[in-house]
Image: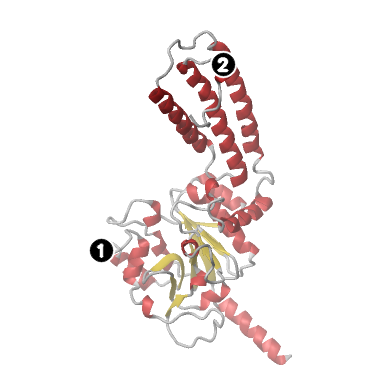
Amino acid sequence: MRIFFVSLTTIIAYVSAENHVMMSILTNDAFLLPAMVLAHRLKVLNMTAPYVLLVTEHVSKESISELESHNITVRHTSLLTVPHAKKAAKYHYTKLRLWSLTEYDVIMYLDLDILPLKDLTPFFQCGSFCATFRHSDKFNAGLLVLKPNLTVYKDLLEKAPYLSTYDGGDQGFMNSYFDQLKFTPMFDHNHPNNQKYQSEQRRLSAVFNYDIGMYYLNGGKLLVDPVIIHYTLGPLKPWIWWTSPLFDLNVHWCEARKEMEQQYVDPNPDVQLILFTVLTIVCAAIFRKVLLIASRDYFRADSLTSIEERTTHYVVVWLSFVIAFNLVPQTAHPFASWIYFITNFVSESCCAAVARLVLKGGHLDQCHCAVSLP
């Protein structure tokens, strides 16, 4: 019993002595949804460390209000860039400001396209700077563990304008700054308090930052049991409606989103999209009927040539596809979005087929949807 109380006292003393925090950075409204999903996921995992979201001046007040309604701690910061960095938001250097937050002992930084699957607490003990090397000698800066230090922070700011960056952003810069990290020992997360080799900096296992690109390159096989899934396939993020059927690992993120929305948002988020689908069908049917009646006496006497007919057909199909695709809200739920997209596509194609018939000089009973083969 005495040993138990001594151990418990030691754990409590350690937790109280170490001020740990998990952080992400939101630079615009486009990543609002993944920020809320990540915050909720960390709560579901019962993480003992708090989660703080740094927001820059480009995040709207409406987005900040929505974050706060989800009980997410929001902290303001300013965007940090350097002259030679690429202009896209993903290449900003704001991540360097983490080293200035010395009120925290250890910061675990997570990109917003990350989904934790298990407890991350053991990784707080890895050292002063830790990152994952996945498929090259360059580490990924989407997930970091670091100890804030003003001396390091000032040095980072001084070297940021001229130190080389292979990707034009902060990841390339940090790889140049922490160029010896690749030679450090691997952190044993299974025995966080008993490391074989002593080192202030450590490499982290791929389980801590699993790149879904490697999953698909290996034929849809998990090479490790991931603690974190990192959705790194460029713009093909799991919250984009049309990506879910294409990438099966997206189902984990979609399930996390569903859990979050059941607690904080309308439990029937697809109702509005379904109503729009029904409205689209009704409007398309009415428009088709009106167009047929109005054009009854105005069919062309001369038929289109074969080239004109084929060109018109494909133009109608592609225009219908593009319009229908862009009408779907980008972050809507996949199932309802696909129904809405297909409905719009078919409806627009059928209505366009009527107009095509007018140009062709056919009869009303020849009217068919443009999605059919010519």
Label 2 sits on a secondary structure element that is helix
* Label 1 vs 2, first from the N-terminus: 1
Determine contact: label 1, label 2, CB under 8 Å: no
User: x, y (%) of residue 27?
Assistant: 44, 52
Residue 96 position by quadrant: bottom left
Q: Which mark is residue 282?
A: none
Identify the residue shown where x is 44% and y is 86%. Answer: 198
Q: Is residue 52 left or right of residue 179?
A: right
Identify the residue shown where x is 65% and y is 47%. Answer: 265
Q: Is residue 104 visible?
A: no
Residue at far front of view:
306
Identify the residue shown where x is 70% and y is 88%. Answer: 4
User: x, y (%) of residue 188?
Assistant: 51, 81
Identify the residue shown where x is 69% and y is 91%. Answer: 3
What amino acid is found at the position of numbered circle 1 in the picture? Tyr
Q: Which residue is mark 2?
A: 364
Q: Is residue 85 visible?
A: yes
> Where the N terminus falls, by quadrant?
bottom right
Vertical order, 80 against 322 (above or below): below
Label 1 sits on a secondary structure element that is loop
Q: Which residue is mark 1?
A: 162
Q: CA distance from mark 1 to mark 2?
A: 70 Å
Residue in the foreground of this view, choosing between 222 and 175:
222
